[in-house]
Amino acid sequence: MKSFLSCETELRKVLIPQNRLQERVSELGHEISRDFLGKDLAIVAILKGSFIFAADLLRAIEIPCSIDFMGISSYASQPGSGVVQITKDLDESIAGRNVLLVEDIIDTGLTANYLLNNLSQRNPASVDICALLDKSARRIIDLPIPYRGFDIPDVFVVGYGMDFQQQYRNLPHISVLRLNGGTKTNSEATVSDPADSKSES
Ligand code: IMP
Ligand code: MG
């Protein structure tokens, strides 16, 4: 399919269709509800990429919880440095609370590692990661990800909140993006869902 926004990029294939996203987010919501039952759950969603995932996840969580947002500098600004600029901090204290850090995608792990350290310094009762996507093959820093939607290969993805140059966030599914003249994708990409080990294309 041709990009509807730019002649320099091309949407290659749907990696995760809308119905699989909905099913998996619902499963994650059940798991989180079970594990945090009776606890003071504070969802911290990282802007901008996780905003659609966080909105759906919140509605799949069946126990009381709050949500707050942190804005961080974009992926392209300092790739690989592990340095993250906080552009919007939390509005509320997380001291003594059980924090669930909601991310769109864990790639090298540098961003999530920075955020884990940052949040841990605010004296929460606990901090756990919930990531919709995991590019585990690219991991530099080993991180525990107790709530993980899908493991994906080393491809650049957009949609369901995730962008390329601020575009494509509005796609209802997750697609592989190909940068013409570049190698942002592998057309044989498949995705695996930790809930069932079979892969789909
Ligand atoms: P990391 O620090 O390398 O783990 O990068 C994580 C961040 O990079 C994610 O939260 C995304 O914002 C961004 N990112 C990494 N891979 C992709 C991708 O395929 N599409 C869109 N954003 C991505
Ligand atoms: Mg992100």
Image (cartoon, helix red, strand yellow):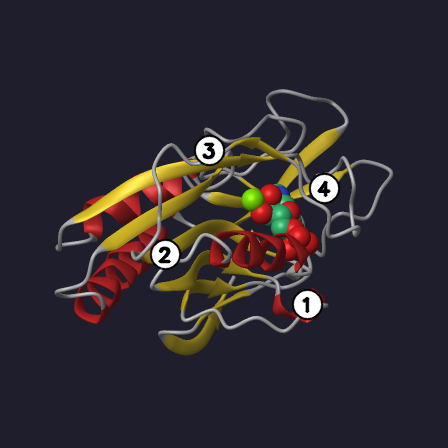
The label nearer to you, 1 versus 4, is: 1
The label nearer to you, 3 versus 1, is: 1
Percent coordinates x, y for residue 27 in the rendering = 25, 63
Question: Quick one: SS at disc 2?
Answer: strand
Q: Point out which mark residue 139 bears.
A: 1
Which of the two discs, 4 and 3, labels the residue nearer the N terminus?
3
Check disc 4 and give the amino acid type. Arg
Asked if disc 3 is less than 8 Å from ligand 1, the answer is: no
Residue at 60 percent across and 60 percent down: it is 113
In the current view of this chain or complex, which residue is farthest to the right? Answer: 181
Residue at 71 percent across and 65 percent down: it is 138
The label nearer to you, 2 versus 4, is: 2
Q: Which residue is mark 3?
A: 171
Say if residue 157 shows up in the picture: no
Q: Which residue is mark 4?
A: 178
Residue at 21 percent across and 56 percent down: it is 40
Marks 3 and 2, Cα distance to the nearest angstrom? 25 Å
Which of the two discs, 2 and 4, labels the residue nearer the N terminus?
2
Marks 4 and 3, Cα distance to the nearest angstrom? 15 Å
Judged left or right of residue 181, residue 200 is left
Snapshot quadrant of residue 63: bottom left
Question: Quick one: SS at disc 4?
Answer: strand
Asked if disc 1 is less than 8 Å from ligand 1, the answer is: yes
Neighbourhood count class around disc 2 (C-alpha, 10 Å): few under 14, some 14–19, many 20 upward: many
Which of the two discs, 2 and 1, labels the residue nearer the N terminus?
2
The label nearer to you, 3 versus 2, is: 2
Q: Quadrant of the N terminus?
A: top right
Check disc 2 and give the amino acid type. Leu
Marks 1 and 4, Cα distance to the nearest angstrom? 21 Å
Marks 2 and 4, Cα distance to the nearest angstrom? 32 Å
Marks 2 and 1, Cα distance to the nearest angstrom? 20 Å
Percent coordinates x, y for residue 15 in the rendering = 52, 53
